[in-house]
């Protein structure tokens, strides 16, 4: 996807892994805190689910950016229950003329990489963030 700036996975408000495909436009070049981005993604999706009864947010459109979200569930080995928790894959891309159609295509396209991530890390200890670094190469290969 030539208009993709970045894609990654967020869990419990932290960006576990991401890959930057290209730089953001100059107007958005300010250094952003990765933890703030992860917390924002988690918070906005939690708000949508709670406020609108289990409805998840699919995208946010900004001036020249489109932020897409796909939520699934994964079981973490570091919580003492068998309960699954939300895992969010996000994509940050150029704004589109027809965002609804584009977002639907993007969400369909990323389903295999989300399932691969879940299969790979189901039951993992999510407190050790460095274990996810190797998945960056998978993100890069998937979108190339």
Image (cartoon, grey):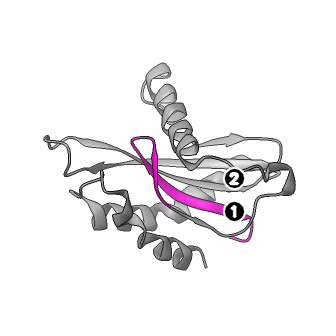
Prevalent SS, magenta region: strand
Up-down relation of residue 98 to residue 60 (above or below): below
Q: Quadrant of the N terminus?
A: bottom right
Looking at the image, tell me whether mark 1 or mark 2 is earlier in sequence order.
1
Q: Which residue is mark 2?
A: 101
- Which residue is pictured at 73% across the width and 71% down the height? 2
Up-down relation of residue 137 to residue 121 (above or below): below
Which secondary structure lies at badge 1?
Answer: strand
Rendered location of residue 92, percent (x, y):
66, 54
Span of residues in magenta: 1-17
Left or right, residue 72 beside residue 27: left
In depth, the one of 135 and 69 nearer the eye is 135
Left or right, residue 56 beside residue 126: right
- Which residue is pictured at 66% across the width and 70% down the height? 21
In depth, the one of 57 and 126 nearer the eye is 126
Left or right, residue 89 beside residue 119: right
Rendered location of residue 70, percent (x, y):
50, 49
Q: Which residue is mark 1?
A: 5
- Structural crowding at the residue carrying mark 1, measured as other residues with C-alpha within 10 Å and reported as few (<14), some (14–19) or many (≥20): some
Rendered location of residue 96, percent (x, y):
79, 53
Magenta region includes residue 16 = yes
Report the label total: 2
């Amino acid at each position: 996807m030539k208009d993709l700036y970045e894609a990654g996975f967020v869990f419990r408000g932290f960006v576990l892994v991401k890959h930057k495909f290209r730089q953001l436009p100059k107007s958005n070049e300010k250094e952003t805190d990765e933890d703030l981005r992860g917390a924002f993604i988690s918070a906005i999706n939690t708000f949508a689910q709670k406020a609108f009864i289990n409805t998840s947010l699919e995208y946010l459109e900004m001036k020249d950016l489109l932020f897409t979200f796909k939520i699934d569930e994964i079981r973490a080995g570091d919580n003492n229950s068998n309960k699954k928790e939300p895992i969010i894959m996000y994509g940050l891309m150029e704004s589109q003329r027809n965002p609804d159609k584009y977002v639907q295509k993007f969400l369909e396209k990323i389903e295999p990489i989300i399932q691969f991530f879940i299969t790979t890390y189901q039951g993992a200890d999510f407190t050790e963030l460095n274990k996810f670094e190797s998945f960056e190469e998978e993100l890069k290969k998937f979108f190339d």
